[in-house]
Amino acid sequence: MADTTARTLNASPRRHIAVIPCRWGASRFPGKPLARLGDKPLLWHVHQRCLEAKHLDGTVVATDDERIEAACQQLGIECIRTGEHLTGTDRVAEVAERLPADAYINVQGDEPFITPDAIDAISKALKNLPPDTLAVNAYTELVDVGAVLDHNVVKVVVTAQGQALMFSRQPIPYPKGERPKYLRQLGLYGFTSPALQRFRQLQPGPLERAEGVEMLRLTEHGHGVKMIHVADDGVAVDTPEDLARAEVLLVQR
């Protein structure tokens, strides 16, 4: 994957900006954003995928950690230092208060193989949001049984109208009758600025607190989340074991 020159952000209003929220203290993998994948930190690979998208006006890393900020400076990656936050989306919401844009796409820093086409699909969907819908979220079908059972992989159930019905780390729906299709929520969310402000106003509910899935904050409070099917065959890096699998995939590509 070729290196792409970073675009510099400024204070002028932008249309769509990708924000990569990064924190140091992940319980399953401390220091994950700076873990090496090939010869570059994990966050660099995510940043590259964003730069390859065609519908973005900029990409910025958002972090509260000085080590991650210093690494971004060394790599020539635009970075905004934020306060501490419960979720990545809360961190993106702070960026939205400081960096004007029409919409913001939260690209999680552990998705080094997220496709630029998937990012662009979220950007396109943000231009035509249904009424009462506050967010757009990408998903893909799961075919690996191990991933279906893995609690690190968030599953989603989608209505016939393409709205999120429920998110869970458990395999949902339960296969009492015929075997259902299992869908994986990707770490790829899109919001307008007012939607991010609303997200920060809402209190995490019992489902979000139990599951640790931030999109549940919207569905629990009755707000719509539009699900967009995208192609994805990468690896989300939640653990050191995932990083080893990503190394193999990087070599293959």
Image (tube, rainbow, N blue to C red):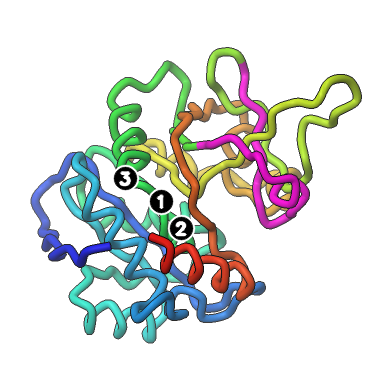
Which span is picked out in magenta?
A: 139-159
In primary-sequence order, the first of circles 1 and 3 is 3
Q: Amino acid at mark 2?
A: Glu
Amino acid type at mark 3: Tyr
Q: CA distance from mark 2 to mark 3?
A: 17 Å
**Position of residue 175 measured from the top left corner of the image (x, y, whole percent):** 85, 28
Tell me what residue is drawn at x 28 percent, y 25 percent: 127
Residue furthest top in the image: 160
**In the displayed structure image, the side of residue 82 where residue 182 appears, left or right:** right
- How many other residues sit within 10 Å of disc 3, few (<14), some (14-19) or many (≥20)? many
Q: Is residue 57 above or below residue 44?
A: above
Question: Are the residues at dot 2 and dot 1 in contact (C-beta closer than 8 Å)?
Answer: yes
Residue at image point 57% right, 80% down:
30
Q: Is residue 2 above or below residue 162?
A: below
Q: What residue is pinned by disc 1?
A: 114
Q: Quadrant of the N terminus?
A: bottom left
Give the x, y percent position of residue 101. 21, 44
Residue depth check, mark 2 versus mark 3: number of the one nearer the observer: 2
In the rendered image, residue 140 lying in the magenta stretch gets the answer yes
Residue 22 on image: x %, y %: 43, 68
Q: Secondary structure at mark 1?
A: loop
Number of marks in picture = 3
Identify the mark at residue 111; answer none if there is no mark: 2
